[in-house]
C-alpha cells in the first residue's frame, strides 16, 4: 500500500534464506497444516512439462501411510508448466508427514485438530507493532504531539484537532478512518463469534501482561478510541491523518521526519471527509459523499458498544450515541469518501458505499432493535448484493471495499427467514462468480490486483459465512484453497503471514523490519500481483537477487524483497481482515 518514491532503499536485512526447491518440481503444502476432517490437497508445480503418475505420503519413520495414489493433472498456471492436485483428504490420522512425488519431498505436513490454534491471535502482534500514539514495541510515543492540523477545510483549516492514536496503515505512517474502521470491525466480529481463539497476554497499552481482557478486545478498543477522535463533532467526520508526503524519508515511526510544510518531524495534516474531490496538490481523488466512511464508523461504534456493554458502560453509551450520529450523517450524504492523495497518484479508490451503510444500519439494529435500521440495511443490501470485484479479472485499488460484505451475514443473524434466504443467495452469487474463474490447479479465482491476499482472505470469510448460514458445502473446496494459498499452496511456496509456517517473508517492505531486523510477526503481506501491475508501479526496484526467480516467469509475480511495496508490504487492514476466518478455524 505504501508507494514509496525513494531513489534508493538500504539493502535487505538478510536472515535465513527461504527454502526454495532447486529442482524443476515443487510440492506446495499448507504450512500451518490440515485439520483431520477437512479437505487436504497439496499442489505439485512443475516448471517444465512433465508426467506425474502418483504420489505417496510418508511418516517420520519413512513408512508409507498413504498411497501411492494418482495425482490429478490440472494444467498450466503461472510459472507452472503443469500442475497436479494431490488430494489426501482420506488421510485423517494426526501426525507429521511428508509428501513424495517425482522424487521430490514436500515441507512437513501436519495433520491435527489444532493446526490453526494461535493463528488469529498471532496477527495481533503486528497490530500492536503498528500502534500510533503510544507504541509498545518501541516503548515510546509515535506522533503523539503532531496529530494533527486540519487541512482542506473551507473555514477551519489550520485548526489543531487531537487525533493521536490508532494504527499506521502499512509500512508508511498514514492512517485512514475507513481502513481503521474495517479493521476494528473485523476484530470485534472475531471476538464476538470466536472469543476462544484469542489469549490475554497483553495490557491495554500493548505492553506484556494480562489485564483480564482478551487481547483482541484490547486491540479493538485501540481502534475505537482513535475512531472516536476522528469523529469529534456530529458534522465533522475525519478521513485521513498524514498523506503521501510521508514517503519522502525512510524513517522509523518514532523519529518520523516527514515535512508537511510545518518543518521536518512537525505536525501532520488531518483531512475531513468533504464529499468533494480531495488532494492538496496536482492529484485528486473522486469523492462524492460521506456514506462509505460514515457507514464503516457506525458499524464499528455499534459493535463496540455491544462488546463493552458489560465491561465499560460509559464507553458503550458513548459509542452507541456516536454510531447513531455518524450513521445519520452518512444517510444525509450518500456517496464515497476516498483517501486523499498528495504528491503521488495513488489513493484508495473506493467506489461503493451501500455496503458500508448496510453494515452500519444492521449493527445499529442489532444494538437497538429499532426496526427502521433493519429495513434500511435490507434496502442497502439490494443495492449491492454481490461485492463487485467477484467474478472480475481486475479492479482499481480498493475500488470495492471492504473486499467482502459482512453485513449480509449480520442480516442473516438478526433477520427473519425470508431475509435470511435473500442474503444467503447474495453470498452464493459472489462465491459462484469467483469459483467459475478457479479452474486452475490452485483453485484460485480472484483477480491478482494489488492486495490479492486480502481478496483471498475475504473470499474465504464469505465462504465461511455462507456455509454457516446454509450448510451448503458447494464452495468448501475453494474456501479451503484460498486459505491454503495464503499459507503456502502457491507457486512460490510462501506463507503470506510473517512468522507463520516454515517459509514466510523475511525481507518485507518495512523500515522497522529493515533497520531494526525486527520480525513483524503476524503481518499479512499484500501478495502476488499481475506482472503488468508490478511493471507499471513507480519507484519499485528489487534490492537483492530474487530467490524466487524460477517461479516469477508467469503472469503473476511475488518477491520477498524490501524494495517491492506491491507484493511484500505487510498491511494493517489486510491483517485484521484475516483475523475472523482464522479465528473461525480455531479448535481446542
Ligand atoms: Ca489483554
Ligand atoms: Ca464500500
Image (cartoon, rainbow, N blue to C red):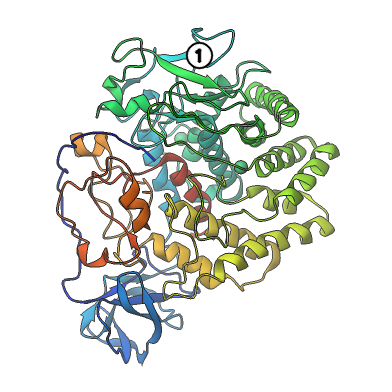
Q: Nearer the viewer, residue 408 or 320?
A: 408
Residue 131 image-quadrant placement: top left
Report x, y in % for residue 522.
36, 46
Tell me what residue is drawn at x 42 percent, y 37 percent: 346
Q: Is 556 above or below relative to 241?
A: below
> In x, y percent, where is residue 329?
71, 25
Image position of 179 with respect to 445: above or below: above
From the image, which quarter does the N terminus lie in?
top left
Residue 369 spot, x, y in % from top left: 81, 38
Q: Residue at x 54, y 37 (%)?
A: 184
Residue 552: name its quadrant. Answer: bottom left
Q: Nearer the viewer, residue 434 or 124?
A: 434
Q: Is residue 423 left or right of residue 566?
A: right
| 70 and 174: which is toward the camera | 174
Residue on which disc 1 sits: 150
Q: Position of residue 281 (x, y in %)?
A: 43, 22
Task: Choose top left, top right, bottom left or bottom right for residue 111.
Answer: bottom left
Position above or below: 217 against 14: above
Image point 70% across, 30% down: which residue? 330
Q: Is residue 518 visible?
A: yes
Of 417 and 380, which appears nearest the observer? 380
* Mark 1 residue element: strand
Amino acid at each position: 500500500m505504501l508507494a514509496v518514491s525513494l531513489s534508493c532503499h538500504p539493502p535487505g536485512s538478510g536472515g535465513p534464506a527461504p527454502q526454495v526447491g532447486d529442482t524443476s518440481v515443487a510440492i506446495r503444502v499448507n504450512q500451518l497444516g490440515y485439520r483431520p476432517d477437512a479437505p487436504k490437497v497439496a499442489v505439485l508445480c512443475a516448471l517444465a512439462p512433465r508426467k506425474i503418475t502418483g504420489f505417496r505420503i510418508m511418516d517420520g519413520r519413512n513408512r508409507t501411510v498413504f498411497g501411492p495414489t494418482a495425482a490429478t493433472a490440472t494444467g498450466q498456471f503461472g510459472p507452472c508448466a503443469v500442475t497436479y492436485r494431490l488430494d489426501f483428504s482420506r488421510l485423517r490420522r494426526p501426525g507429521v508427514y511428508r509428501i513424495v512425488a517425482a522424487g521430490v519431498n514436500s515441507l512437513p505436513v501436519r495433520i491435527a485438530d489444532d493446526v490453526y490454534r494461535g493463528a488469529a491471535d498471532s496477527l495481533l502482534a503486528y497490530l500492536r507493532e503498528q500502534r500510533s500514539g503510544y507504541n509498545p514495541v518501541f516503548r515510546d510515543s509515535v506522533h503523539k504531539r503532531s496529530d494533527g492540523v486540519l487541512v482542506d477545510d473551507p473555514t477551519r483549516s489550520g485548526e489543531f484537532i487531537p487525533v493521536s492514536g490508532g494504527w499506521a496503515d502499512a509500512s508508511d505512517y498514514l492512517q485512514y478512518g475507513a481502513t481503521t474502521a474495517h479493521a476494528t470491525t473485523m476484530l470485534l466480529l472475531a471476538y464476538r463469534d470466536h472469543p476462544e481463539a484469542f489469549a490475554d497476554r497483553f495490557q491495554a497499552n500493548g505492553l506484556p501482561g494480562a489485564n483480564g481482557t482478551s487481547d483482541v478486545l484490547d486491540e479493538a478498543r485501540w481502534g475505537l478510541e482513535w475512531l472516536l477522535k476522528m469523529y469529534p463533532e456530529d458534522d465533522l467526520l475525519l478521513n485521513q491523518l498524514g498523506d503521501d508526503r510521508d514517503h519522502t524519508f525512510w524513517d522509523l515511526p518514532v523519529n518520523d521526519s516527514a515535512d508537511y510544510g510545518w518543518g521536518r518531524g512537525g505536525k501532520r495534516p488531518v483531512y475531513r471527509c468533504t464529499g468533494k474531490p480531495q488532494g492538496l496538490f496536482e492529484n485528486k481523488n473522486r469523492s462524492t459523499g460521506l456514506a462509505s466512511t460514515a457507514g464503516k464508523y457506525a458499524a464499528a461504534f455499534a459493535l463496540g458498544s455491544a462488546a463493552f456493554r458489560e465491561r465499560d458502560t460509559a464507553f458503550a453509551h458513548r459509542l452507541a450515541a456516536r454510531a447513531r450520529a455518524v450513521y445519520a450523517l452518512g444517510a444525509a450524504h450518500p456517496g464515497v469518501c476516498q483517501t486523499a492523495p498528495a504528491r503521488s497518484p495513488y489513493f484508495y479508490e473506493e467506489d461503493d458505499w451501500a455496503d458500508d451503510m448496510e453494515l452500519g444500519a444492521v449493527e445499529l439494529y442489532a444494538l437497538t432493535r429499532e426496526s427502521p435500521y433493519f429495513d434500511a440495511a435490507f434496502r442497502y443490501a439490494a443495492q449491492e448484493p454481490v461485492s463487485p470485484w467477484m467474478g472480475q479479472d481486475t479492479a482499481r485499488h480498493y475500488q470495492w471495499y471492504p473486499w467482502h460484505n459482512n453485513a449480509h451475514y449480520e442480516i442473516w443473524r438478526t433477520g427473519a427467514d425470508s431475509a435470511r434466504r435473500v442474503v444467503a443467495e447474495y453470498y452464493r452469487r459472489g462465491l459462484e462468480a469467483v469459483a467459475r474463474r478457479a479452474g486452475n490447479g490452485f483453485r484460485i479465482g480472484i483477480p491478482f490486483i494489488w492486495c490479492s491476499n486480502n481478496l483471498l482472505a475475504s473470499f474465504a470469510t464469505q465462504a465461511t459465512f455462507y456455509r454457516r448460514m446454509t450448510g451448503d458445502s458447494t464452495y468448501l473446496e475453494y474456501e479451503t484453497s484460498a486459505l491454503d494459498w495464503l499459507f503456502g499452496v502457491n507457486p512460490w511456496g510462501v506463507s503470506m503471514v510473517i512468522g507463520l509456517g516454515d517459509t514466510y517473508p523475511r525481507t518485507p517492505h518495512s523500515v522497522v523490519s529493515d533497520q531494526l531486523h525486527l520480525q513483524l510477526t503476524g503481518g499479512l503481506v499484500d501478495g502476488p500481483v499481475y506482472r503488468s501491475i508490478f511493471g507499471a508501479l513507480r519507484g519499485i526496484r528489487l534490492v537483492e537477487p530474487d530467490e524466487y526467480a524460477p517461479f516469477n516467469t508467469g503472469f503473476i509475480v511475488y518477491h520477498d524483497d524490501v524494495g517491492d511495496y506491491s507484493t511484500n508490504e505487510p498491511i494493517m487492514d489486510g491483517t485484521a481482515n484475516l483475523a475472523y476466518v482464522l479465528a473461525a478455524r480455531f479448535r481446542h
